[in-house]
Image: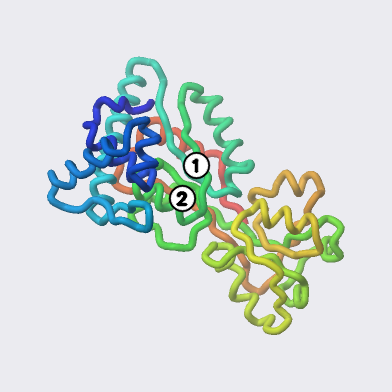
Amino acid sequence: MRTDPSILSTAFRYFLAVADAGSIRAAARELNIVSSAVNRQVLLLEESFGIRLFDRVGRGLRLSEAGTMLARQVRETLDRYDDVVGELDTLRGLKRGRIRIAAVESISVERLPDLLAEYWRRHPGIEAVLTVAGAEEVTRLVEDGRVDVGFAFSIRPLEGLRLVHAEAHAVGVLTAADHPLAARPALGFADLAGEPLILPARGLSLRAAIEPSLTPLGRDLRIRAEVDTLRMMAAVVRRSDSVGFLTRVGIEADLRAGDLAWIPLDEAEPVVDRLTVVRRDGVVPSLALAAFTDLVEELWRPET
């Protein structure tokens, strides 16, 4: 269920458009109006509240602390409106609703589509708005109320978020199917000394999971590249003698096709990456969202 824009004042609609677009000009293009009209409405809001809502950053605009607070409140108002309309629709037997989902790339490849297929089999009238982003962005989207539920491999505390589901996934070594290491039943980090490694970028939870075990390699640690996407990791490894690190999540089809090999890590301490499913705490979920998170718990089981 999409919110009818007419319930928002012009000033608030233009304010949110600028917050999303990052500039007056870009917001005006989205709204299909002249830039001066957008700027005028934003100035009226700032004058009304007596505080600056945006900070200028280069050629763009970024929400100030006050602007961030206002944007969150306006969006929460819209969310509550959407939820009420959805509940009323359900009472009328229309069975309509909407869920907004953000997920990291690996989840969006297979597991989330499978989950949605079953959800729509049970609830065909529910609309889903899907966003694929990095783990930090997924978490921020949930915190800010921009999405209802987020799927991410994350290492930071979940402040202000409610944990719906968590899974620990084993990290393994990724190689091309014909790589000499591919036939090994298991590998330790010591076995990778001198191998050309493709590492997950710093800041990713996967990098944090393997970093302590890489340090002891010392001079034998050979880093060929660092990448920040699952598909790039898999693509580079498939085409070269490089060695990468991933969980099995997101590469299921590649493994079934025999294009890649995934070798378990045999270490004294298990090397795992933690998948979390979260929603905002303190917010009553809509019927559509509650049904979706219930399905996650029904179909997904903790894995190691």
Q: Horizontal placement of 128 versus 37: left or right?
A: right
Amino acid found under the numbered disc labelled 2: Val
Q: Position of residue 37 (x, y in %)?
A: 26, 35
Instruction: Tell me which numbered mark, 2 or 1, is placed earlier along the sequence.
Output: 1
Q: Which mark is residue 12?
A: none
Apparent side of residue 119 relative to residue 13 in the rendered image (left or right)? right
- Residue under circle 2? 138
Q: Are dots 2 and 1 in contact, CB under 8 Å? A: yes
Gap between marks 2 and 1 measured at Cα: 8 Å
- Is residue 297 at all visible to an observer of this figure? no
Q: Give the structural element (helix, strand or loop) at label 1.
A: strand
Crowding at mark 1 (Cα within 10 Å: few <14, some 14-19, many 20+):
some
Q: Residues within 10 Å of mark 2 (few under 14, many from 20)?
A: many
The three-letter amino acid code for the residue at tag 1 is Thr
> What percent of the width, then of the height, locates residue 289?
41, 35
Mark 2 lies on a secondary structure that is: helix
Kindly identify which residue carries mark 1. Answer: 131
Determine which quarter of the picture holds residue 31. top left
Q: Which residue is depicted at the point 33% across and 28% down?
A: 3
Percent across and percent down for residue 170 are 64, 60
- Report the quarter where the N terminus lies: top left
Asked which quadrant contains residue 97, the reply is: top left
